[in-house]
Amino acid sequence: MNKVEICGVNTARLPVLKPDETDRLLALAHGGDAAAREELINGNLRLVLSVIQRFMNRGEYADDLFQVGCIGLMKAIDNFDTSLGLRFSTYGVPMIIGEVRRYLRDNSAIRVTRSMRDTAYRALQAREKLRAENQSEPTVEQVAAAIGVPREEVVFALDSIADPVSLYEPVYSESGESISVVDQVRDTKNTDEHWLEQIALGDAIGSLGDRERHILALRFYYGKTQTEVAGEVGISQAQVSRLEKNAIKKIKKEL
């Protein structure tokens, strides 16, 4: 009654392998036993299912994530080094997570160049390696030195593959009231007052004559002197000065 199927697989009946059985099958699979590899894949599908649970809120189909996770599982099986004495899940889970994340990044609505993604992946791998070696979080400078690229490129690359966050994503909630990302973002440039000033200024300039608007554009947009404006318009410098002052006076009055 509570059966859940993904890609035609009944996830309620997925088998679970014991560690010693997993080791035995891994040895057989690496020796070319296709049946052992198939059994190993089926016995670790619960691992894939547990991993994709954390990615279920991205708007992706569970079937797609499950298939991508299975690819990561097969890569883990084929590349796992049994001589290290580690549990397979210790190696398999990061491989599955990496495959799912790669799929989500490559299929994101935000397009990132291949070279930028490659730099980001190299930076992530270097960061994981440095973290394991030093037992501490590496700095951006250390990651950049490890992969041989400038610090700025590492920062840009890692930012480019970061998952986008909705402005209405809750970041804090208490007593039924939640604070969203948009509540924490402040734009000191594009405020309502700034927009109103721009609209009012546009209306005020629109009330001027063509010659007055042209003179103001030459003076304050193109940065020309009154003498240069006079030569271009064909009037004296004194006339330019008088027209400029009258235009500014009209604008101030309108505002």
Image (cartoon, grey):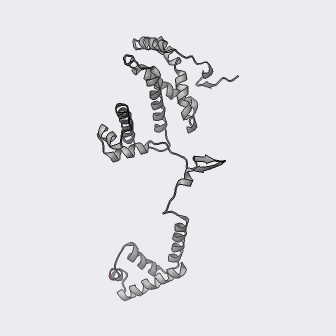
Q: Visible in this render: residue 236?
A: no
Specify the quadrant that holds the C terminus.
bottom right
- Rendered position, 113 above or below 78: below
Instruction: Indicate whether 138 appears above or below 204.
Output: above
Q: Which residue shows up at 55% across the image and 47% down it?
A: 166
Above or below — where is 114 with respect to 243?
A: above
Residue 36 percent location from the top left of the image: 47, 12
Please give the name of the residue rendered at 46% of the width and 81% of the height, measured from the top-left corner: 248
Quadrant (top left/top right/bottom left/bottom right) for the N terminus: top right
Pick the residue in front: 254 or 40: 40
Number of numbered markers:
0
Q: Quadrant of residue 115?
A: top left
What's the magenta region? Answer: 223-228
Q: Quadrant of residue 6?
A: top right
Res. 103 in view: yes
Question: What residue is drawn where x is 56% and y is 54%?
Answer: 183
Closest to the observer, 10 or 226: 10
- The x and y percentages for residue 38 are 49, 15
Q: Is residue 50 magenta?
A: no
Q: Name the spot of residue 178 as percent of width and height, x first.
A: 62, 49
How far from the left and from the top, in percent, is residue 63? 57, 29
